[in-house]
Image (spheres, helix red, strand yellow):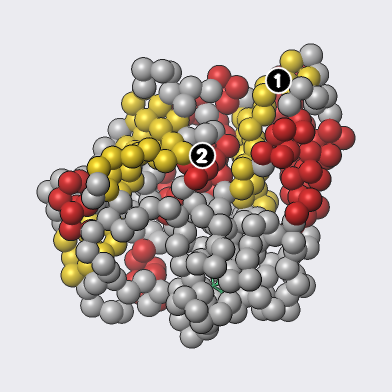
Amino acid sequence: MKPFDYARPGDVAEAVRVATLPGAVFLGGGTNLVDHLKLGVARPDLVVDVRTLTSREVTDTEDGGLRAGAAVTNSELAADRRVRERYPVLAQALLAGATGQLRNTATTGGNPLQRTRCVYFQDVTTPCNKREPGTGCSAIGGTTRNHAVLGASQACIATHPSDMAVALAALDACVQVLGPTGERTVPFTELHRLPGDDPSRDTVLEQGELITAMGLPPLPAARTSAYRKVRDRASYAFALVSVAAVLDVRDGVVQDVRIALGGVAHKPWRATRAEQALRGGPATPDAFAAAAAEELADARPQPGIDGGNGFKVPLVTRTLVATLRDLTAAQEG
Ligand code: SF4
């Protein structure tokens, strides 16, 4: 492990000021960063510990939404009664991630910033544009089972690993950020980047910008929402494919729908094409499958020495149909 300096500032303003220095990183729960320090994937000069600086409370907002401080743990957020009642998709996504021990440590601010589990990214002996820009992508032509089918580039075909982030994308959450130039709010769907020609940057956050809270908007339809995750093992595994969905159906007609997909792209993938296809139409399995086809029209499965990831396209369709079918049944009986 490369030696680094450690700082524990007195407040968030000082943390942001200290972390503006190149080579500085924030430490929240540390469940991803500490692994990367040990593997040599992360080689910071300075680790700025912010664990005790941001809020660890979930509060009601005046407009009927919720605000979760960045230090709220994944376990605490999943167990919050208001989250379970008003945003079950988020509680289910949180509980689908990692293990109880990790959820007790991982934070609301840190979870969406975890990095890809591409095996080449985590193996410092292999070329990887995300870890070392300009060295190439070992996954292309390598093992691609867990890689992207949407929005990838020739520079990187990695997927984003967070379950929580998929739910937040479907819920139109917003990210509160404090940086060297002040506060700003980032729509959650705009937090993560597609790889393009610079996959080293996962998000739009600049050096020194700290997530201080996550905002959940009032969304009555989200009381009927669900997260469905398909993975190789029943627990402690990342999604091959996942679906976060909010569905409002009346008299067999889709009034409102929000969908995000996990395990398919470099970012949580908001399925706007599928949503558009579904709104105002019949809530039937055929319509759900047609909407999935619409969303996947630009899918580009990757060949690979492990058989590739072409299976993800039909798997997304089946997972989306099953999720929407169950949500319809929950409302219409
Ligand atoms: Fe690196 Fe991305 Fe290629 Fe994986 S897919 S080896 S993270 S550049």
Residue type of the residue flagged with mark 1: Gln
Residue 306, by quadrant, is bottom right
Packing grade of label 2 (10 A; few <14, some 14-19, many >=20) is: many
- Label 1: element kind: strand
**Residue placed furthest toward the left:** 10
Mark 2 C-beta closer than 8 Å to ligand 1: no
Give the side of residue 221 with respect to residue 55, left or right: right
Image height check: is 78 above or below 282?
Answer: below
Residue 70 in the image: above or below residue 201: above
Residue located 37% across and 38% down the image: 185
Residue situated furthest bottom in the rendering: 125
Q: Gap between marks 2 and 1, in whole Å?
A: 20 Å
Q: Is residue 76 left or right of residue 183?
A: right
Work out whether mark 2 precedes mark 1 in sequence or the reverse, and give the earlier one: 2
Q: Which residue is mark 2?
A: 168
Residue 315 visible at all: no
The numbered mark at residue 280 is none
Eyeballing the image, is 160 above or below 138? above
Residue 275's spot in the image, x, y percent?
Answer: 70, 34
Which residue is nearer to you in this view: 82 or 54? Answer: 54
Residue 248 visible in this rendered orientation of the protein: yes
Residue type at the position of mark 2:
Leu
Answer few, some or many: residues within 10 Å of disc 1's Cα (few below 14, many 20 plus, some between 14 and 19). Answer: some
Front residue of 189/254: it is: 189
Q: Helix, strand or loop at disc 2? A: helix
Total of numbered circles in the picture? 2
Residue 190 rendering spot, x and y as whole percentages? 49, 45
User: What quarter of the picture does the C terminus occupy?
Assistant: top right
Q: Which residue is mark 1?
A: 255
